[in-house]
């Protein structure tokens, strides 16, 4: 029962959209209908609010961290942690409170992964920052980091369940970034900091 209730609770928490709530609070346009139409920190930044983007990023990371740490406190077992992490991540991608129209999942993926093993943080963040700084594309940085995640998990944890989680998260991230991939290939993907 624990393996059902805990991931479900994580999904419900993950369904809380930081971007939508913070945009409403700050009087910004709905990130689902403006800019890139993605309810995430990068789009909130694109819509013109740096504080809003920071708050959105923090909220999306937190809703990944909290369920996994709670599950770890209840029962520190790899399968439970992986299912809980996946629940929170799917909640962000397909939020029940917002007609299943969620974000791309990058920040929430970071949250669940760092909660599983804090040693991942510098590797994931450094990979994203290096690619973002050199390319100026948030989406490309996310895609490269996602591809590297299962490798980092294998290297740092050696736990097959966590490596499997990394592969699933990466696959879902690529699925959610399919339009970004097409724009990158066409050369018309918006760069970081470019306002809508």
Image (cartoon, helix red, strand yellow):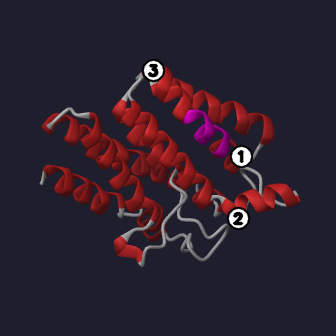
Specify which label sits upstream in the sequence, 3 or 2: 3
Q: Quadrant of the N terminus?
A: bottom left
| Disc 1 and disc 2 in contact, CB within 8 angstroms | no
Above or below: residue 166 compared with residue 127: below
- In the rendered picture of this protein, how many numbered marks are placed on residues? 3
Q: Which residue is mark 1?
A: 140
Q: Residue furthest front?
A: 160
- In the depicted view, which residue is nearer to us: 62 or 7? 7
Q: Position of residue 3 (x, y in %)?
A: 19, 50
Q: Residue at x 24, y 60 (%)?
A: 8
Above or below: residue 66 compared with residue 191: above
Mark 3 element type: helix
In space, the residues marked 3 and 1 are separated at their CA atoms by 24 Å
Q: Quadrant of the C terminus?
A: bottom right
Q: Which residue is mark 3?
A: 156
In space, the residues marked 3 and 2 are separated at their CA atoms by 32 Å
């Amino acid at each position: 029962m624990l393996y059902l209730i805990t991931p479900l609770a994580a999904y419900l928490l993950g369904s809380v959209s930081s971007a939508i709530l913070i945009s409403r609070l700050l009087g910004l346009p709905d990130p689902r209908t403006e800019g890139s139409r993605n309810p995430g920190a990068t789009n909130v930044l694109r819509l013109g609010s740096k504080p809003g983007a920071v708050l959105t990023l923090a909220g999306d990371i937190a809703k990944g961290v909290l369920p996994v740490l709670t599950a770890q406190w209840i029962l520190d077992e790899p399968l439970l942690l992986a299912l809980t992490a996946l629940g929170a991540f799917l909640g962000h991608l397909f939020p029940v409170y917002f007609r299943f129209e969620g974000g791309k999942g990058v920040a929430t993926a970071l949250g669940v992964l760092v909660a599983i093993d804090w040693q991942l943080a510098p590797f994931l963040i450094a990979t994203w920052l290096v690619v973002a700084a050199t390319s100026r594309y948030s989406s490309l940085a996310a895609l490269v980091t996602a591809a590297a995640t299962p490798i980092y998990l294998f290297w740092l944890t050696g736990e097959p369940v966590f490596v499997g989680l990394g592969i699933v998260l990466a696959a879902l991230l690529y699925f959610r970034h399919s339009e970004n991939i097409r724009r990158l290939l066409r050369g018309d993907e918006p760069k970081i900091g470019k306002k809508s």
